[in-house]
Amino acid sequence: MSYDHSLINGGYGPVHEGGGLVETVDDEFDGYDDNDTLQKLFAHLQLNKDRKAIDTKALTKSFGWNSSDVFQQHDVQELCRVLFDALEESLKGTPTEHLVNDLYQGQLKDYVQCANCGNESSRVDNFLDLSLVIRPFGSSTEMMKSVEEAIEYFLKPEMLSGENQWDCARCGTKQDAIKGLKFSKLPYMLALQLKRFDFDYTTFNRIKLNNQVRFPNQDDDMSPRSVGGDSASSSSLSPPTTSPPLDDDDDTWHAAYNVDAVLEASGPYVYELFSWYNFNDSTVTKITDAEVQTAWGPTSHQASTYGGYRSSGSTCAYMLMYRLVDRSRNEAAIADSQVPSFLKDLIVSDESKRLEKEKEREEKARLIQLKVFADDATTFKTMHISKLTPLSAVTEKACVLFDHITYDPALVRLRSYSEYTKMPQDTYTGREH
């Protein structure tokens, strides 16, 4: 599975909401930078509803990738960042230059707090996605069983004590301190990468963690624990209509998120119009909630059957896309009539060229090469002819290859010929038409 297809299908909904990239009019549209190619790709997805799949080659080409880069294995998070960086660069100076940050950027506060006086030192960092550990470092058996548990572990503070004590400016001496992370601002689209690849220090091999990690589904109870509040072990995805900071003294604010896309090896699962769909490289199939849950990974019993976390199975989620439940932002996708006319013209032109090339390919696939011998079979000519061409027409075209032969159906006929025996074989009399 190519992860560019996963990311495009997973990101199409939120970027497309309320117009987004598709409605951005670019008078200098040339189809070569990332903004143009993605805008055009989204327009294809919007307008070409009869197509089974839309090609993404133009988008990867706009990244500056050549043919060898396209076939190189890319980590889904790495590819996500390549796409975001390329978009940010190409959107500079346009009305949607902050599109990526508006959708995906959140803030984390990295803090150290004195355990004696409460003095705190902190900095705020931006993020576009979060990497969640499935197996804690140094553990051979402990595994995260759910996304909520993985977020709790991500936010879990550590105690700095002994030789690691923190030099507190207020106390004037080294003190025990609490070091950790808090969400300062949650994004509209929360991208979570599950770190399913690890290093086994026993075998010194890179391994895949194929154990089950449950994630909340549509309409599931996300449990209203505070997200990143002052509570040390707080974490959750559960309902505001705004995005205030979460590291203040109010521990009661919650954020509700619905899973929007599940990215895994066999294709992304995307939630659209109250149903789940499986997007792979060539088809889109409606699937059930139970099928989506296969992306959790095998149960403990199944995992042990296949060798535990060393299992080679691939039906496990690598990245999850959550969308904030916010009525002011959860808009319906734009209508076809809202797509700019220049994009509609480009799509019509593209479709015409595609159908023409497809027709040429079909005609070329019907062609066969014939080696035509004449007279004493010492000379021959080569011709390409459609498999559907009547033999009488083939005979007439063959005569044109030889200047000294005039076509006369009463005097000229085709026979099969063996180059091995150098002998003529069956005639096609009665099968000319």
Image (cartoon, rainbow, N blue to C red):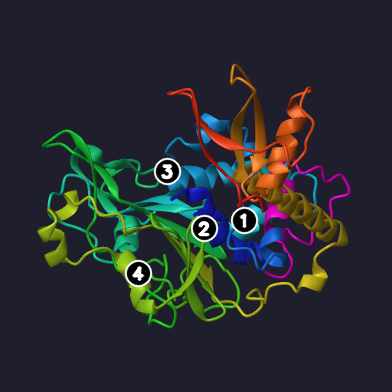
Location of the C terminus by quadrant is: bottom right
In what element is the residue under mark 3? loop
Which numbered dot is residue 292?
none
Q: Quadrant of residue 217?
A: bottom left
Sequence-wise first label, 1 or 3? 1
Q: Main secondary structure of the magenta part?
A: loop
Q: What stretch is highlighted in magenta?
A: 17-43
Q: Is residue 10 visible?
A: yes
In what element is the residue under mark 1? loop
Q: How far apart are marks 3 and 4 (CA)?
A: 21 Å
Which numbered dot is residue 75?
3
- Foreground disc of the pair 3, 2: 2
Q: Where is residue 56 in the image (x, y as percent from the top left)?
A: 60, 48
Which amino acid type corresponds to the residue marked 4 in the rendered image? Phe
Which amino acid type corresponds to the residue marked 3 in the rendered image? Asp
Q: Distance between the residues labelled 3 and 2?
A: 21 Å
In what element is the residue under mark 4? loop
Q: In which quarter of the image is residue 134?
A: bottom left
Q: Residues within 10 Å of mark 3 (few under 14, many from 20)?
A: few
Q: Mark 4 points at which residue?
A: 215
Q: Mark 1 points at which residue?
A: 54
Q: Name the residue under label 2.
A: 282
Question: Contact, CB < 8 Å: mark 3 with mark 4?
Answer: no
Which amino acid type corresponds to the residue marked 1 in the rendered image? Ile
**Residue sitting at x 32%, y 59%:** 316
Q: How far apart are marks 4 and 2 (CA)?
A: 27 Å
Q: Residue furthest top?
A: 378
Q: Residue furthest front?
A: 410
